[in-house]
Image (cartoon, rainbow, N blue to C red):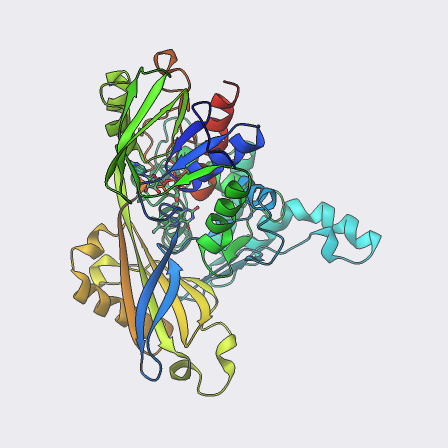
Amino acid sequence: MPRPGTDAVTVIGAGWAGLAAAIHLVRAGRSVRLLDAAPQAGGRARRITLQWEHPAEGVNPVELDNGQHLLLGAYTEVLQLLEVIGAMEEPRLQRRPMRLASSSGLLMERPGFASDRLGTAGSAIAGAVLAPLSPLLGLVRAQGLSAGSRWAMVRVFAQLRLAGWRPPPGVSTVAEWYRQARQPAELVERIWQPLVISALNTPADRACARTFLRVLRDSLGGPPGASDFVLPLRDLSDLFVDPALGWLRQHGAELMLRSDVRRIERGGTCRYRVVGSDRNTDNPLSIECRQVILATPPYASARLLEGVAEPSLVAELNRFQYLPITTAYLGWPHEALAPKDGFQEPIVPALMSLRESAAEHRFAQWFFDRGPQAHWRIAALVLSDSRAARELGDNQLGEALTRQVTDELALPAPMQLSLIHEKRATIACTPDRPRLLPDAAGPRLRGLALAGDYMYGDYPATLEGAVRSGRVAAEAVAGG
Ligand SMILES: Cc1cc2nc3c(=O)[nH]c(=O)nc-3n(C[C@H](O)[C@H](O)[C@H](O)COP(=O)(O)OP(=O)(O)OC[C@H]3O[C@@H](n4cnc5c(N)ncnc54)[C@H](O)[C@@H]3O)c2cc1C
Protein backbone atom coordinates (compact mmCIF):
# COMPACT_ATOMS: atom_id res chain seq x y z
CA MET A 1 0.00 0.00 0.00
CA PRO A 2 1.43 3.48 -0.83
CA ARG A 3 2.55 5.64 2.13
CA PRO A 4 0.18 8.49 2.96
CA GLY A 5 1.31 11.76 1.31
CA THR A 6 0.97 15.43 2.24
CA ASP A 7 -2.80 15.15 1.98
CA ALA A 8 -2.79 12.75 4.96
CA VAL A 9 -3.90 14.05 8.35
CA THR A 10 -1.04 13.76 10.86
CA VAL A 11 -2.32 12.61 14.26
CA ILE A 12 0.24 13.15 17.02
CA GLY A 13 -0.31 10.86 20.02
CA ALA A 14 -1.55 7.27 19.80
CA GLY A 15 -3.41 7.15 23.10
CA TRP A 16 -7.14 6.38 23.04
CA ALA A 17 -7.94 9.92 21.78
CA GLY A 18 -5.46 9.72 18.88
CA LEU A 19 -6.51 6.17 17.97
CA ALA A 20 -10.17 7.22 17.97
CA ALA A 21 -9.40 10.29 15.84
CA ALA A 22 -7.44 8.15 13.35
CA ILE A 23 -10.26 5.60 13.07
CA HIS A 24 -12.90 8.29 12.50
CA LEU A 25 -10.72 10.00 9.87
CA VAL A 26 -10.22 6.75 7.97
CA ARG A 27 -13.96 6.13 8.10
CA ALA A 28 -14.48 9.62 6.65
CA GLY A 29 -12.26 8.63 3.71
CA ARG A 30 -9.09 10.45 4.80
CA SER A 31 -5.62 9.01 4.78
CA VAL A 32 -3.88 9.13 8.15
CA ARG A 33 -0.43 9.10 9.64
CA LEU A 34 -0.36 8.35 13.39
CA LEU A 35 2.75 9.16 15.44
CA ASP A 36 3.71 8.45 19.01
CA ALA A 37 6.92 9.09 20.91
CA ALA A 38 6.57 5.87 22.89
CA PRO A 39 7.55 2.43 21.65
CA GLN A 40 3.93 1.31 21.96
CA ALA A 41 0.49 2.82 21.42
CA GLY A 42 -2.18 3.18 24.11
CA GLY A 43 -0.75 6.07 26.15
CA ARG A 44 -1.95 5.96 29.74
CA ALA A 45 -4.21 2.98 29.02
CA ARG A 46 -1.81 0.40 27.66
CA ARG A 47 -0.44 -3.01 28.50
CA ILE A 48 2.65 -3.36 30.68
CA THR A 49 4.65 -6.48 31.45
CA LEU A 50 5.97 -7.30 34.91
CA GLN A 51 8.51 -10.03 35.59
CA TRP A 52 7.37 -11.90 38.69
CA GLU A 53 9.29 -14.70 40.34
CA HIS A 54 7.13 -17.69 41.21
CA PRO A 55 8.45 -20.08 43.89
CA ALA A 56 8.05 -23.15 41.66
CA GLU A 57 8.03 -21.76 38.11
CA GLY A 58 10.79 -19.12 38.27
CA VAL A 59 10.62 -15.69 36.62
CA ASN A 60 7.82 -15.27 34.10
CA PRO A 61 6.15 -12.29 32.42
CA VAL A 62 2.77 -11.15 33.69
CA GLU A 63 0.76 -8.85 31.43
CA LEU A 64 -1.27 -6.13 33.14
CA ASP A 65 -2.34 -2.55 32.54
CA ASN A 66 -0.42 0.62 33.14
CA GLY A 67 -3.15 1.33 35.69
CA GLN A 68 -6.28 -0.54 36.75
CA HIS A 69 -9.23 0.84 34.77
CA LEU A 70 -12.98 0.45 35.07
CA LEU A 71 -15.25 1.17 32.11
CA LEU A 72 -18.99 1.73 32.42
CA GLY A 73 -21.94 0.79 30.25
CA ALA A 74 -22.33 4.58 29.78
CA TYR A 75 -19.12 4.57 27.71
CA THR A 76 -21.19 4.42 24.56
CA GLU A 77 -18.55 5.75 22.16
CA VAL A 78 -15.88 3.34 23.42
CA LEU A 79 -18.31 0.45 22.96
CA GLN A 80 -19.31 1.67 19.49
CA LEU A 81 -15.68 2.00 18.45
CA LEU A 82 -15.01 -1.56 19.60
CA GLU A 83 -17.82 -2.65 17.27
CA VAL A 84 -16.43 -0.61 14.36
CA ILE A 85 -12.96 -2.18 14.56
CA GLY A 86 -14.37 -5.68 15.02
CA ALA A 87 -13.12 -6.04 18.59
CA MET A 88 -16.50 -7.34 19.78
CA GLU A 89 -16.35 -10.35 17.49
CA GLU A 90 -14.61 -12.38 20.14
CA PRO A 91 -15.12 -11.95 23.87
CA ARG A 92 -12.79 -9.25 25.14
CA LEU A 93 -14.79 -7.84 28.01
CA GLN A 94 -17.10 -8.87 30.77
CA ARG A 95 -20.13 -6.76 31.55
CA ARG A 96 -21.95 -7.00 34.87
CA PRO A 97 -24.79 -5.01 36.45
CA MET A 98 -23.48 -2.37 38.86
CA ARG A 99 -22.64 -3.85 42.22
CA LEU A 100 -21.07 -1.63 44.86
CA ALA A 101 -19.69 -3.67 47.72
CA SER A 102 -17.46 -2.40 50.48
CA SER A 103 -15.22 -4.15 52.97
CA SER A 104 -17.40 -2.71 55.73
CA GLY A 105 -20.53 -4.58 54.62
CA LEU A 106 -22.19 -2.15 52.21
CA LEU A 107 -23.87 -3.79 49.25
CA MET A 108 -25.76 -1.85 46.61
CA GLU A 109 -26.88 -3.49 43.37
CA ARG A 110 -28.83 -2.09 40.47
CA PRO A 111 -31.40 -4.71 39.58
CA GLY A 112 -31.47 -5.65 35.89
CA PHE A 113 -34.86 -5.23 34.19
CA ALA A 114 -33.76 -5.56 30.59
CA SER A 115 -36.66 -7.08 28.73
CA ASP A 116 -34.40 -9.59 27.03
CA ARG A 117 -33.74 -11.14 30.40
CA LEU A 118 -37.47 -11.65 30.93
CA GLY A 119 -39.46 -14.32 29.24
CA THR A 120 -43.08 -13.30 28.66
CA ALA A 121 -44.64 -10.26 27.02
CA GLY A 122 -46.16 -9.29 30.39
CA SER A 123 -42.84 -9.40 32.13
CA ALA A 124 -41.23 -7.48 29.26
CA ILE A 125 -43.74 -4.66 29.83
CA ALA A 126 -43.09 -4.82 33.58
CA GLY A 127 -39.37 -4.66 32.79
CA ALA A 128 -39.79 -1.58 30.59
CA VAL A 129 -41.83 0.17 33.29
CA LEU A 130 -39.52 -0.79 36.13
CA ALA A 131 -36.21 -0.22 34.37
CA PRO A 132 -36.04 3.56 34.98
CA LEU A 133 -36.73 2.90 38.64
CA SER A 134 -33.96 0.36 39.00
CA PRO A 135 -31.40 2.76 40.53
CA LEU A 136 -33.96 3.82 43.14
CA LEU A 137 -34.81 0.20 43.90
CA GLY A 138 -31.09 -0.46 44.22
CA LEU A 139 -30.81 2.38 46.74
CA VAL A 140 -33.88 1.34 48.70
CA ARG A 141 -32.60 -2.22 49.00
CA ALA A 142 -28.97 -1.29 49.77
CA GLN A 143 -27.56 -3.37 52.60
CA GLY A 144 -25.28 -1.99 55.29
CA LEU A 145 -26.69 1.56 55.20
CA SER A 146 -29.02 3.02 57.79
CA ALA A 147 -32.64 3.67 56.75
CA GLY A 148 -31.93 7.42 57.12
CA SER A 149 -29.06 7.25 54.65
CA ARG A 150 -31.04 5.18 52.16
CA TRP A 151 -33.87 7.68 52.31
CA ALA A 152 -31.46 10.64 51.94
CA MET A 153 -30.07 9.02 48.80
CA VAL A 154 -33.45 8.33 47.27
CA ARG A 155 -34.46 11.94 48.01
CA VAL A 156 -31.32 13.42 46.51
CA PHE A 157 -31.68 11.30 43.34
CA ALA A 158 -35.26 12.47 42.92
CA GLN A 159 -34.14 16.10 43.42
CA LEU A 160 -31.30 15.69 40.94
CA ARG A 161 -33.62 14.28 38.28
CA LEU A 162 -35.98 17.22 38.75
CA ALA A 163 -33.09 19.71 38.57
CA GLY A 164 -31.77 18.15 35.33
CA TRP A 165 -28.71 16.78 37.18
CA ARG A 166 -27.31 20.28 37.65
CA PRO A 167 -25.98 21.60 40.96
CA PRO A 168 -27.95 24.40 42.62
CA PRO A 169 -26.72 27.97 41.98
CA GLY A 170 -23.69 28.87 44.05
CA VAL A 171 -22.54 25.24 44.43
CA SER A 172 -19.32 24.50 42.59
CA THR A 173 -17.55 21.61 44.35
CA VAL A 174 -18.88 18.16 45.20
CA ALA A 175 -18.30 18.78 48.93
CA GLU A 176 -20.43 21.94 48.70
CA TRP A 177 -23.10 19.95 46.86
CA TYR A 178 -23.44 17.17 49.40
CA ARG A 179 -23.45 19.69 52.26
CA GLN A 180 -26.16 21.69 50.52
CA ALA A 181 -28.12 18.46 49.84
CA ARG A 182 -27.80 17.61 53.55
CA GLN A 183 -26.31 14.19 52.94
CA PRO A 184 -25.60 12.31 56.20
CA ALA A 185 -21.96 11.74 57.19
CA GLU A 186 -22.40 7.98 56.68
CA LEU A 187 -23.36 8.49 53.02
CA VAL A 188 -20.60 10.99 52.42
CA GLU A 189 -17.96 8.67 53.83
CA ARG A 190 -19.19 5.40 52.35
CA ILE A 191 -20.74 6.38 49.03
CA TRP A 192 -19.97 9.87 47.81
CA GLN A 193 -16.27 10.14 48.67
CA PRO A 194 -15.27 6.77 47.11
CA LEU A 195 -17.37 7.55 44.02
CA VAL A 196 -15.99 11.06 43.55
CA ILE A 197 -12.37 10.08 43.97
CA SER A 198 -12.68 7.17 41.57
CA ALA A 199 -14.74 8.99 38.94
CA LEU A 200 -12.87 12.31 38.96
CA ASN A 201 -9.51 11.46 40.62
CA THR A 202 -9.99 14.68 42.57
CA PRO A 203 -10.88 15.07 46.26
CA ALA A 204 -14.47 16.15 46.92
CA ASP A 205 -13.51 19.57 48.30
CA ARG A 206 -11.85 20.42 44.93
CA ALA A 207 -13.92 18.25 42.57
CA CYS A 208 -16.28 19.90 40.08
CA ALA A 209 -19.92 19.29 41.13
CA ARG A 210 -21.26 19.85 37.60
CA THR A 211 -19.02 17.15 36.14
CA PHE A 212 -19.72 14.71 38.96
CA LEU A 213 -23.49 15.10 38.59
CA ARG A 214 -23.12 14.57 34.86
CA VAL A 215 -21.35 11.27 35.55
CA LEU A 216 -24.21 10.28 37.89
CA ARG A 217 -26.76 11.27 35.25
CA ASP A 218 -25.09 9.20 32.53
CA SER A 219 -24.52 6.14 34.74
CA LEU A 220 -27.01 5.72 37.61
CA GLY A 221 -29.50 8.09 36.01
CA GLY A 222 -28.99 6.66 32.52
CA PRO A 223 -30.82 3.90 30.67
CA PRO A 224 -30.59 0.31 31.94
CA GLY A 225 -27.09 -0.96 31.33
CA ALA A 226 -25.49 2.50 31.58
CA SER A 227 -24.23 1.78 35.08
CA ASP A 228 -22.94 -1.69 34.17
CA PHE A 229 -19.35 -2.36 35.07
CA VAL A 230 -17.30 -3.25 32.00
CA LEU A 231 -13.99 -4.97 32.58
CA PRO A 232 -11.50 -6.12 29.95
CA LEU A 233 -11.06 -9.90 30.07
CA ARG A 234 -7.31 -9.58 29.59
CA ASP A 235 -5.97 -6.05 29.39
CA LEU A 236 -6.67 -2.70 27.76
CA SER A 237 -4.37 -3.31 24.80
CA ASP A 238 -6.14 -6.58 24.08
CA LEU A 239 -9.49 -4.80 24.42
CA PHE A 240 -8.88 -1.79 22.17
CA VAL A 241 -5.31 -0.78 21.36
CA ASP A 242 -4.18 -3.89 19.43
CA PRO A 243 -7.44 -4.31 17.45
CA ALA A 244 -7.39 -0.55 16.67
CA LEU A 245 -3.82 -0.72 15.34
CA GLY A 246 -4.68 -3.82 13.30
CA TRP A 247 -7.74 -2.10 11.82
CA LEU A 248 -5.80 1.08 11.00
CA ARG A 249 -2.99 -0.84 9.28
CA GLN A 250 -5.53 -2.81 7.30
CA HIS A 251 -7.08 0.47 6.15
CA GLY A 252 -3.80 1.93 4.96
CA ALA A 253 -2.92 4.22 7.88
CA GLU A 254 0.78 4.74 8.55
CA LEU A 255 1.78 4.06 12.18
CA MET A 256 5.01 5.65 13.34
CA LEU A 257 5.97 4.69 16.89
CA ARG A 258 9.14 6.05 18.58
CA SER A 259 8.51 9.30 16.71
CA ASP A 260 9.11 12.12 19.12
CA VAL A 261 7.57 15.37 17.94
CA ARG A 262 9.41 18.47 19.19
CA ARG A 263 7.69 21.34 17.38
CA ILE A 264 5.06 22.26 14.89
CA GLU A 265 6.10 24.90 12.38
CA ARG A 266 4.07 26.95 9.92
CA GLY A 267 4.91 27.13 6.28
CA GLY A 268 6.87 24.99 3.85
CA THR A 269 5.03 23.76 0.80
CA CYS A 270 2.12 22.77 3.07
CA ARG A 271 0.44 24.49 5.96
CA TYR A 272 2.41 22.67 8.68
CA ARG A 273 5.73 20.98 9.25
CA VAL A 274 5.86 18.48 12.12
CA VAL A 275 9.44 18.36 13.36
CA GLY A 276 11.06 15.90 15.75
CA SER A 277 13.24 12.85 15.83
CA ASP A 278 12.83 9.22 14.89
CA ARG A 279 13.96 7.27 17.94
CA ASN A 280 14.39 4.09 15.87
CA THR A 281 17.21 5.61 13.83
CA ASP A 282 18.03 8.86 15.70
CA ASN A 283 17.39 10.62 12.41
CA PRO A 284 15.51 13.92 12.32
CA LEU A 285 11.83 13.72 11.50
CA SER A 286 10.09 16.26 9.28
CA ILE A 287 6.57 15.78 7.96
CA GLU A 288 4.68 18.24 5.82
CA CYS A 289 0.92 18.22 6.00
CA ARG A 290 -2.14 20.43 5.80
CA GLN A 291 -3.93 19.04 8.82
CA VAL A 292 -2.82 18.00 12.26
CA ILE A 293 -4.59 16.56 15.29
CA LEU A 294 -2.69 17.09 18.49
CA ALA A 295 -3.79 14.20 20.71
CA THR A 296 -1.16 14.73 23.38
CA PRO A 297 -1.70 15.71 27.03
CA PRO A 298 -2.09 19.46 27.60
CA TYR A 299 1.45 20.03 28.93
CA ALA A 300 2.89 18.34 25.79
CA SER A 301 0.50 20.18 23.46
CA ALA A 302 1.49 23.50 25.07
CA ARG A 303 5.17 22.75 24.34
CA LEU A 304 4.47 21.79 20.73
CA LEU A 305 2.37 24.89 20.11
CA GLU A 306 4.81 27.33 21.69
CA GLY A 307 5.65 30.08 19.19
CA VAL A 308 3.04 28.98 16.66
CA ALA A 309 -0.31 29.30 18.51
CA GLU A 310 -1.71 32.35 20.26
CA PRO A 311 0.13 32.77 23.60
CA SER A 312 -3.28 32.75 25.34
CA LEU A 313 -3.93 29.15 24.16
CA VAL A 314 -0.50 28.02 25.36
CA ALA A 315 -1.22 29.72 28.70
CA GLU A 316 -4.60 27.93 28.99
CA LEU A 317 -3.01 24.56 28.22
CA ASN A 318 -0.39 25.26 30.89
CA ARG A 319 -3.08 26.13 33.43
CA PHE A 320 -4.22 22.47 33.84
CA GLN A 321 -3.17 20.83 37.09
CA TYR A 322 -2.59 17.09 37.46
CA LEU A 323 -3.11 14.45 40.09
CA PRO A 324 -1.40 11.08 40.41
CA ILE A 325 -2.86 7.57 40.60
CA THR A 326 -0.94 4.62 42.00
CA THR A 327 -1.89 1.06 41.12
CA ALA A 328 -0.56 -1.80 43.23
CA TYR A 329 -0.63 -5.23 41.60
CA LEU A 330 -0.70 -8.11 44.06
CA GLY A 331 0.14 -11.69 43.15
CA TRP A 332 -0.51 -14.94 45.01
CA PRO A 333 0.60 -18.32 43.69
CA HIS A 334 -2.69 -20.19 43.13
CA GLU A 335 -1.96 -22.69 45.86
CA ALA A 336 -1.47 -19.91 48.44
CA LEU A 337 -5.10 -18.86 48.05
CA ALA A 338 -6.93 -22.07 47.35
CA PRO A 339 -5.19 -25.33 48.14
CA LYS A 340 -7.97 -27.26 46.40
CA ASP A 341 -9.68 -26.02 43.26
CA GLY A 342 -11.66 -23.02 44.39
CA PHE A 343 -9.50 -20.33 42.80
CA GLN A 344 -11.88 -19.65 39.92
CA GLU A 345 -14.21 -18.04 42.43
CA PRO A 346 -13.57 -14.36 43.12
CA ILE A 347 -11.16 -13.82 46.01
CA VAL A 348 -13.66 -11.40 47.53
CA PRO A 349 -16.43 -9.68 45.52
CA ALA A 350 -14.55 -8.95 42.30
CA LEU A 351 -14.67 -5.20 42.85
CA MET A 352 -14.80 -3.82 46.34
CA SER A 353 -14.42 -0.41 47.92
CA LEU A 354 -12.00 -0.23 50.85
CA ARG A 355 -11.93 2.02 53.90
CA GLU A 356 -9.44 4.73 53.02
CA SER A 357 -7.80 6.61 55.88
CA ALA A 358 -4.46 8.29 55.21
CA ALA A 359 -4.06 8.93 58.96
CA GLU A 360 -4.19 5.15 59.56
CA HIS A 361 -2.00 4.44 56.51
CA ARG A 362 -4.85 2.76 54.62
CA PHE A 363 -4.34 4.32 51.22
CA ALA A 364 -6.14 2.05 48.75
CA GLN A 365 -9.73 2.94 47.86
CA TRP A 366 -10.63 0.02 45.58
CA PHE A 367 -9.75 -3.64 45.25
CA PHE A 368 -10.15 -5.44 41.87
CA ASP A 369 -9.84 -9.19 41.54
CA ARG A 370 -8.24 -9.65 38.10
CA GLY A 371 -8.58 -13.42 38.22
CA PRO A 372 -6.01 -16.07 37.34
CA GLN A 373 -3.10 -15.51 34.95
CA ALA A 374 -0.39 -18.12 34.35
CA HIS A 375 0.63 -19.39 37.80
CA TRP A 376 -0.79 -16.43 39.67
CA ARG A 377 -3.98 -15.09 41.15
CA ILE A 378 -3.81 -11.34 40.62
CA ALA A 379 -5.55 -8.39 42.20
CA ALA A 380 -5.13 -4.64 41.85
CA LEU A 381 -5.41 -1.92 44.47
CA VAL A 382 -6.25 1.57 43.25
CA LEU A 383 -4.97 4.65 45.02
CA SER A 384 -6.54 7.68 43.32
CA ASP A 385 -4.98 11.05 44.15
CA SER A 386 -2.06 9.14 45.67
CA ARG A 387 -0.07 12.20 46.79
CA ALA A 388 -0.13 11.32 50.49
CA ALA A 389 0.65 7.64 49.83
CA ARG A 390 3.70 8.48 47.72
CA GLU A 391 5.26 10.46 50.55
CA LEU A 392 5.85 7.14 52.35
CA GLY A 393 8.26 5.74 49.75
CA ASP A 394 7.69 2.44 47.95
CA ASN A 395 8.88 0.06 50.70
CA GLN A 396 6.71 1.50 53.44
CA LEU A 397 3.78 1.95 51.05
CA GLY A 398 4.04 -1.71 50.01
CA GLU A 399 3.97 -2.75 53.67
CA ALA A 400 0.97 -0.49 54.38
CA LEU A 401 -0.96 -1.93 51.42
CA THR A 402 -0.15 -5.49 52.47
CA ARG A 403 -1.48 -4.67 55.96
CA GLN A 404 -4.62 -3.18 54.42
CA VAL A 405 -5.50 -6.32 52.42
CA THR A 406 -4.62 -8.73 55.21
CA ASP A 407 -6.55 -6.76 57.88
CA GLU A 408 -9.47 -5.50 55.85
CA LEU A 409 -10.06 -8.43 53.48
CA ALA A 410 -8.56 -11.24 55.55
CA LEU A 411 -6.37 -12.32 52.62
CA PRO A 412 -2.92 -13.84 53.02
CA ALA A 413 0.00 -11.48 52.35
CA PRO A 414 0.69 -11.41 48.61
CA MET A 415 3.95 -12.91 47.39
CA GLN A 416 4.38 -10.19 44.75
CA LEU A 417 3.50 -6.52 45.03
CA SER A 418 4.39 -4.09 42.25
CA LEU A 419 3.63 -0.39 42.38
CA ILE A 420 2.94 1.67 39.26
CA HIS A 421 2.88 5.41 39.85
CA GLU A 422 1.39 7.69 37.21
CA LYS A 423 2.40 11.17 38.32
CA ARG A 424 0.12 12.98 35.88
CA ALA A 425 -2.58 10.32 35.67
CA THR A 426 -5.39 12.80 35.00
CA ILE A 427 -6.05 16.50 35.12
CA ALA A 428 -7.44 17.80 38.40
CA CYS A 429 -11.16 17.94 37.65
CA THR A 430 -11.81 21.26 39.40
CA PRO A 431 -14.62 23.72 38.62
CA ASP A 432 -12.13 26.32 37.33
CA ARG A 433 -10.15 24.04 34.97
CA PRO A 434 -9.82 25.39 31.42
CA ARG A 435 -12.62 24.34 29.07
CA LEU A 436 -11.25 24.12 25.53
CA LEU A 437 -12.83 23.17 22.22
CA PRO A 438 -11.06 21.11 19.53
CA ASP A 439 -10.74 24.20 17.33
CA ALA A 440 -9.27 26.24 20.21
CA ALA A 441 -6.26 27.09 18.02
CA GLY A 442 -8.61 29.32 16.01
CA PRO A 443 -8.42 30.52 12.38
CA ARG A 444 -4.72 31.32 12.80
CA LEU A 445 -4.05 27.56 12.88
CA ARG A 446 -6.63 26.35 10.39
CA GLY A 447 -6.67 22.58 10.04
CA LEU A 448 -5.17 21.99 13.49
CA ALA A 449 -7.41 20.42 16.13
CA LEU A 450 -6.82 19.37 19.73
CA ALA A 451 -7.90 16.04 21.21
CA GLY A 452 -7.39 14.31 24.55
CA ASP A 453 -9.25 13.31 27.69
CA TYR A 454 -8.91 16.88 29.03
CA MET A 455 -10.92 18.32 26.13
CA TYR A 456 -14.34 16.84 26.33
CA GLY A 457 -16.24 19.64 28.06
CA ASP A 458 -18.02 18.44 31.14
CA TYR A 459 -16.63 14.93 31.20
CA PRO A 460 -13.91 13.83 33.62
CA ALA A 461 -10.60 12.60 32.19
CA THR A 462 -11.68 9.11 31.14
CA LEU A 463 -11.36 6.71 28.24
CA GLU A 464 -14.81 7.76 27.09
CA GLY A 465 -13.84 11.46 27.20
CA ALA A 466 -10.65 10.67 25.25
CA VAL A 467 -12.49 8.72 22.56
CA ARG A 468 -15.24 11.35 22.21
CA SER A 469 -12.66 14.13 21.90
CA GLY A 470 -10.93 12.12 19.15
CA ARG A 471 -14.19 11.86 17.22
CA VAL A 472 -14.91 15.59 17.57
CA ALA A 473 -11.38 16.55 16.47
CA ALA A 474 -11.64 14.22 13.45
CA GLU A 475 -14.94 15.85 12.48
CA ALA A 476 -13.31 19.29 12.80
CA VAL A 477 -10.56 18.51 10.27
CA ALA A 478 -12.11 15.78 8.09
CA GLY A 479 -13.68 18.20 5.64
CA GLY A 480 -10.33 19.67 4.51
C1 LIG B 1 -3.64 4.80 36.65
C2 LIG B 1 -4.78 5.30 35.82
C3 LIG B 1 -6.06 4.82 36.06
C4 LIG B 1 -7.12 5.26 35.27
N1 LIG B 1 -8.36 4.75 35.49
C5 LIG B 1 -9.35 5.04 34.62
C6 LIG B 1 -10.60 4.36 34.70
O1 LIG B 1 -10.81 3.51 35.57
N2 LIG B 1 -11.56 4.66 33.77
C7 LIG B 1 -11.35 5.58 32.78
O2 LIG B 1 -12.24 5.77 31.95
N3 LIG B 1 -10.18 6.26 32.70
C8 LIG B 1 -9.18 6.01 33.58
N4 LIG B 1 -7.97 6.65 33.47
C9 LIG B 1 -7.84 7.74 32.49
C10 LIG B 1 -7.53 7.24 31.07
O3 LIG B 1 -6.46 6.33 31.06
C11 LIG B 1 -7.18 8.44 30.23
O4 LIG B 1 -8.27 9.34 30.27
C12 LIG B 1 -6.91 8.12 28.76
O5 LIG B 1 -6.05 7.03 28.61
C13 LIG B 1 -6.30 9.36 28.10
O6 LIG B 1 -6.10 9.12 26.73
P1 LIG B 1 -5.50 10.28 25.81
O7 LIG B 1 -5.37 9.69 24.46
O8 LIG B 1 -6.27 11.53 25.98
O9 LIG B 1 -4.05 10.62 26.42
P2 LIG B 1 -2.75 9.70 26.56
O10 LIG B 1 -3.13 8.31 26.87
O11 LIG B 1 -1.86 10.40 27.53
O12 LIG B 1 -2.09 9.71 25.11
C14 LIG B 1 -1.22 10.72 24.68
C15 LIG B 1 -0.15 10.09 23.79
O13 LIG B 1 0.64 11.14 23.27
C16 LIG B 1 1.96 10.68 23.21
N5 LIG B 1 2.86 11.85 23.17
C17 LIG B 1 3.03 12.79 24.13
N6 LIG B 1 3.92 13.71 23.73
C18 LIG B 1 4.31 13.36 22.47
C19 LIG B 1 5.20 13.92 21.53
N7 LIG B 1 5.88 15.05 21.79
N8 LIG B 1 5.38 13.29 20.34
C20 LIG B 1 4.68 12.14 20.04
N9 LIG B 1 3.82 11.57 20.91
C21 LIG B 1 3.63 12.17 22.11
C22 LIG B 1 2.13 9.83 24.46
O14 LIG B 1 3.22 8.93 24.34
C23 LIG B 1 0.78 9.15 24.54
O15 LIG B 1 0.79 7.88 23.91
C24 LIG B 1 -6.90 6.25 34.26
C25 LIG B 1 -5.61 6.74 34.03
C26 LIG B 1 -4.56 6.27 34.79
C27 LIG B 1 -3.18 6.80 34.51
Location of residue 140 by image quarter: bottom right
Question: Up-down: is 308 above or below 157?
Answer: above
Residue 56's x, y, as percent? 34, 84
Which residue appears at 35% of the width and 81% of the height?
Answer: 57
User: Which residue is at the far bottom?
Assistant: 340
Compare residues 305 and 153 and report the one nearer the observer: 305
User: Residue 107: x and y, percent?
Assistant: 50, 62
Report the label total: 0
Tell whether 125 sits left or right of 43.
right
Using the rendered view, name the quadrant where residue 34 is placed. top left
Q: Quadrant of ligand 1?
A: top left
Q: Position of residue 374 (x, y in %)?
A: 43, 74
The x and y percentages for residue 158 are 55, 40
Q: Nearer the viewer, residue 124 or 93?
A: 93
In this rendering, the answer to whether 255 lies above or below 479 is below
Question: From where the camera sits, is residue 110 visible?
Answer: yes
At 57% across and 50% down in the image, what residue appears?
87
- Say whether residue 26 is left or right of residue 103: right
Q: Is residue 151 positioned above or below 266 on the image?
A: below
Residue at 36% across, 43% down: 257
* Residue at far right of view: 121
Residue 133 vs residue 26, the one in the foreground:
26
Q: Residue furthest top?
A: 443
Q: Quadrant of residue 94?
A: bottom right
